[in-house]
Amino acid sequence: MFGIETLGGNAQAVVLVGIVLFEALLLYVGYGGLETVVGPAFTRVLKGQCAVLDAVFMRCSAAENGGADR
């Protein structure tokens, strides 16, 4: 897929480790962004301050008292 099988043993290992580290970094940033976007609404649902469908359709209020706008 990447053509690393044509490299020698040490070079192949270095490239493979680099690819894995790059993938791990992308996942770390991606899941961090997802948690920033979805996390607060999910927390309000778990605390019972917001209904699941309200959180899915982003109708859940971010008010301090946790109440949903209706």
Image (cartoon, helix red, strand yellow):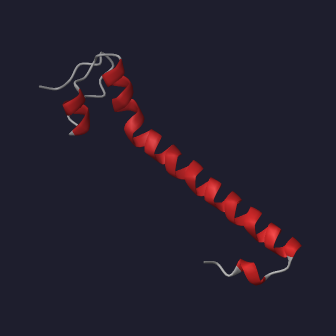
Residue furthest to the left in view is 70
Residue at image position (60%, 78%) is: 1
Residue furthest to the right in view is 10
Residue at image position (20%, 39%) is: 57
Query: Residue 65's spot in the image, x, y percent?
Result: 30, 15
Residue at image position (81%, 68%) is: 14
The residue closer to the viewer here, 37 or 14, is 14
The residue closer to the viewer here, 67 or 43, is 43
The residue closer to the viewer here, 50 or 66, is 50
Residue at image position (19%, 32%) is: 53
Total labels drawn? 0
Report whether residue 34 is seen.
Answer: yes
Query: Residue 27's spot in the image, x, y percent?
Result: 56, 52
Quadrant of res 67:
top left
Residue 47 falls left or right of residue 59: right
Residue 7 falls left or right of residue 23: right
Report whether residue 60 is seen.
Answer: no
Relative to 32, say whether 48 is above or below: above
Looking at the figure, which quarter contains the C terminus?
top left
Relative to 3, say whether 21 is above or below: above
Residue 21 falls left or right of residue 58: right
Query: Residue 48's spot in the image, x, y percent?
Result: 29, 16
Relative to 27, say whether 56 is above or below: above
Residue 47 falls left or right of residue 26: left
